[in-house]
Amino acid sequence: CDGVLEVSYAAKSAECPVCNEAINLNDYEINKPLYEDIFTRGNVTINKLGSLECESLVCHNLKAYGEINTLVHATGDVMIRTRATLPNGLRCKKLLVGRDAHVEVGGDVYAEEMEVDGVITADAFNCVGTTRIDGHGAINGPLKTRSVAMENGGALNGALQIVATKPQAAG
């Protein structure tokens, strides 16, 4: 509902003062296979022995060291350091793809910033800020961004569109 709410650091839940909807603020640490949706304004960490396979993950920050197969919508940063399949897209503030990561996105990626040192494939990439492709990184798909920096050895396999204004984010 776009209501604004301030809560203490230790809070685990809250209620929106505008729409009275319950808000989960819990952090999640996944250490084994999990097959259920997660909706939280907290952070989610998928450890190396953990995996997440579900319809949807909504969180603030995501750190994925274990396998992930879901739609991801993060209000903060997403760091992926493993194999990931995101069948319905990815939306986040900052996307970090680690050196050994292989990410397949079935849909579009929307981010304010991107730093790629692994391999990521998507239908389209929309970055409202800077896209950085490190020496081991590869972006497979068309990229629309405000600026791009690519190290020697990095790859962009798709059309590049540099835009002077911020690309429009899909609702």
Image (spheres, rainbow, N blue to C red):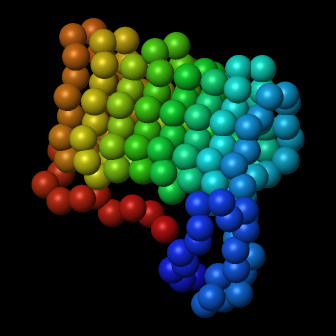
Residue 53 at x, y percent in the picture: 79, 38
Residue for point 71% across, 87% down: 20
Residue 162 at x, y percent in the picture: 18, 44
Residue 101 at x, y percent in the picture: 54, 19
Q: Which quarter shows the N terminus?
A: bottom right
Residue 142 at x, y percent in the picture: 35, 37
Residue for point 70% across, 80% down: 15
Residue for point 28% across, 36% down: 131
Q: Depth check: 41 or 33 in front? A: 41
Left or right: where does residue 82 sit relative to residue 13? left
Q: Is residue 77 visible?
A: yes
Number of marks in picture = 0
The answer to whether 111 is drawn above or below residue 29 in the figure is below
The answer to whether 55 is drawn above or below residue 9 in the figure is above
Q: Depth check: 119 or 22 in front? A: 22
Left or right: where does residue 55 sit relative to residue 87? right
Q: Residue at the left extreme?
A: 164
Quadrant position of residue 47: top right
Q: Residue at the bottom extreme?
A: 18
Q: Is residue 69 visible?
A: no
Residue for point 62% across, 88% down: 17
The answer to whether 26 is drawn above or below residue 53 in the figure is below
